[in-house]
Amino acid sequence: MTKYILGIESSCDDTSAAVLSGTTILSNVIANQKVHSEYGGVVPELASRAHQQNIIPVVETALKRAKISKNELSAIAYTNGPGLLGSLLVGSSFAKAMAYSLEIPLIEVDHLQAHVLAIFAEKPGEEKLKPLFPYLCLTVSGGHTQLLKVNDYFDMELLGGTIDDAAGEAFDKAAKILGLPYPGGPVIDRLAQEGNPDRFKFSTAHLPDLQYSFSGLKTSFLYFVRDNLKENPNFIEENLNDLAASIQAAIIRSLTDKVKEVIRRYDLKDIALAGGVAANSGLRNAMLDIGKRYNRNIFLPSLDLTTDNAAMIAIYGYFKYLSADFSTIKATPYSSVRQRPK
Ligand code: KG4
Ligand code: ZN
């Protein structure tokens, strides 16, 4: 019998609901919250209020687009963390109430692990090649940067990560320095396509092992821009594309250097990207180059599965459903990875 899973995501500033039939995406509705762009970052209180307004229409639209009724659902999967607590509470309370009233299983999902498994969700009719376990996944989002050895759907081994800012944060902070709106990653990506990545050199941190650091890069970018503005008040406008291309190149170099290090140390044939920064065109091309040069298979998620979305919550939920790994209404949301239940 077909299994329909409703996924609900509300960990940050996107309210999303998706319906999957097995691993096939029937709908994936995302309501972005525009309210944060003028503040240069997500305002938690405004985010939870917007989730409250969005959650019912977003879930109704997801069911409608999937052409199924709520009574046909097999289970409801929702993000339990990490994320903003006020935002998580909206999605989790809604999921619990709905699963309880429909008398169907409730499945809690970890947002970061869901980003990783997004690569397994397919569009109707799509026959996509999927990475084989164990494989390497570089997860790059607004809050996290991780190199994971994915041994199985539920077994992800942390090989390395950032000791300070995440890659997405580095993009967002660089954009803010340039006076660009939040989230800055997509804007920098677009501007960089018309710019020269070799025009300005920004050195990246060289940390031992498989660790990343992006806070020094942000500070040197800030000082560089500030010093040049003293000489020429139009420095940013006159060099915007080259600045975007150069800072993007520095972030990508830092990310790919460690991927190459993993290749040297581990025998992993397949490599996947995950998270919002996986939408970056420069990073996608750099990963494809690595694939050719080191003879590795590169798996890039489709763009709508990179940034926060509920299809990734539902696919993780589906795999948990198959192993009857259900949750109870007592599960409490957690804000950071450290609080993730074992
Ligand atoms: O995964 P995500 O939607 O949310 C978190 O879980 O954090 O990632 C959001 C991050 C933001 O920092 C955003 O600027 C970045 O992903 N991002 C990009 C691009 N699209 C989104 N960064 C670089 N290039 C992009 N095209
Ligand atoms: Zn995310």
Image: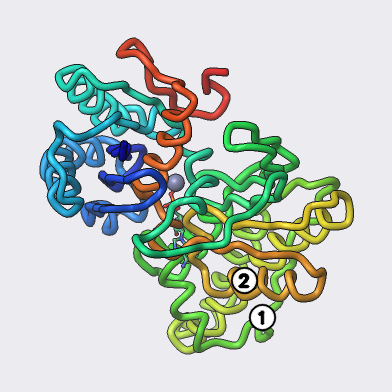
Task: In this rendered view, identify the residue nearer to me: 105 or 200.
Answer: 105
Please tell me whether mark 1 or mark 2 is closer to you in this view.
Answer: 1
Residue at point 56%, 72% (across, down): 225
Name the element at disc 1. Answer: loop
Instruction: Indicate whether 318 appears above or below 21.
Output: above
Residue at point 49%, 25% (across, down): 323
Is residue 8 among the parts visible in the rendering?
no
Any atom of ligand 1 within 8 Å of the CB at mark 1?
no
Q: Amino acid at mark 1?
A: Phe
Where is residue 157, by image quadrant?
top right
Residue 26 is left or right of residue 333, and the answer is: left
Task: In this rendered view, identify the residue nearer to me: 317 or 97.
Answer: 317
- Classify the position of the N terminus by image quarter: top left
Q: Amino acid at mark 2?
A: Phe
The answer to whether marks 1 and 2 mark residues whose Cβ atoms lie closer than 8 Å is yes
Residue at point 30%, 43% (across, down): 43
* Label 1 or label 2, whichever comes before in sequence order: 1
Point out residue 271 in the picture as x, y percentages from the top left corner.
68, 57
Point out residue 49 in the picture as x, y percentages from the top left corner.
18, 37
Instruction: Indicate whether 145 appears above or below 223.
Output: above
Which residue is the site of mark 2? 224
Which residue is the site of mark 1? 200
Q: Residue furthest front?
A: 1
Point out residue 195 in the picture as x, y percentages from the top left corner.
54, 87
- Classify the position of the C terminus by image quarter: top right
Point out residue 237 in the picture as x, y percentages from the top left corner.
43, 84
